């Protein structure tokens, strides 16, 4: 049995950006699910179990910050790569404090994004292995 390709969720309210990210990540070998809003992603996050989410911060309705907080509240350890077109020190700090693995500014360089996703997935898998080792350790 072969291991499945990593699954990346893309959450961005701009159709053209979401489609471009979908194509880029597919061409890099990832399976990709695309969502047009934070609320839509949150409805499917637990069931789809992505290995990483590429998350826009500024969206109508549930913002990227809202999504990050809900993932924490729901104990969903999904690595997050944040993207924004509105860079600020405050938003960078908030995103990183909420557990983002990377904070990237639009327009995002393709290689930088792919590298950030790969690193986020590796870190997430490492955390999962460490957590399962702790759970399986004798008292």
Image (cartoon, rainbow, N blue to C red):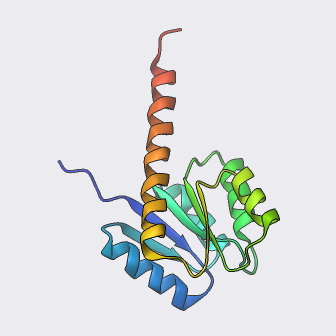
The residue under the point 72% across, 49% down is 73
| Residue 129 falls left or right of residue 28 | right
Q: Going by the picture, which residue comes out furthest to the right?
A: 90
| Residue 46 falls left or right of residue 87 | left
Q: Residue 93: give x, y in percent of width and height.
A: 77, 57
Please say if 90 is above or below 135.
below
Q: Say how many tags the image has.
A: 0
Q: Residue 103: give x, y in percent of width and height.
A: 63, 63
The quarter of the picture where the C terminus appears is: top right
| Residue 100 falls left or right of residue 46 | right
Q: Quadrant of residue 32?
A: bottom left
Q: Nearer the viewer, residue 105 or 4?
A: 105
Q: Residue 126: give x, y in percent of width and height.
A: 45, 38
Q: Residue 106: give x, y in percent of width and height.
A: 60, 79
Q: Going by the picture, which residue comes out furthest to the left?
A: 1
Please say if 9 is above or below 119.
below
The residue under the point 34% across, 74% down is 26
| Residue 104 falls left or right of residue 124 | right
Q: Going by the picture, which residue comes out furthest to the top?
A: 139
The residue under the point 43% across, 78% down is 22
Q: Nearer the viewer, residue 139 or 129?
A: 129
């Amino acid at each position: 049995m072969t291991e499945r390709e990593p699954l990346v969720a893309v959450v961005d309210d701009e159709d053209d950006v979401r489609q471009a990210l979908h194509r880029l990540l597919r061409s890099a070998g990832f399976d990709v699910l695309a969502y047009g809003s934070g609320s839509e992603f949150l409805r499917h996050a637990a069931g789809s179990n992505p290995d990483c989410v590429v998350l826009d911060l500024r969206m109508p309705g549930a913002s990227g910050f809202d999504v990050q907080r809900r993932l924490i509240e729901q104990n969903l350890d999904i690595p997050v790569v944040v993207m924004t077109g509105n860079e600020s020190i405050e938003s960078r700090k908030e995103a990183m404090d909420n557990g983002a693995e990377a904070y990237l500014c639009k327009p995002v360089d393709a290689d930088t994004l792919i590298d950030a996703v790969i690193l986020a997935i590796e870190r997430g898998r490492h955390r999962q292995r460490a957590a399962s080792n702790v759970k399986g350790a004798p008292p």
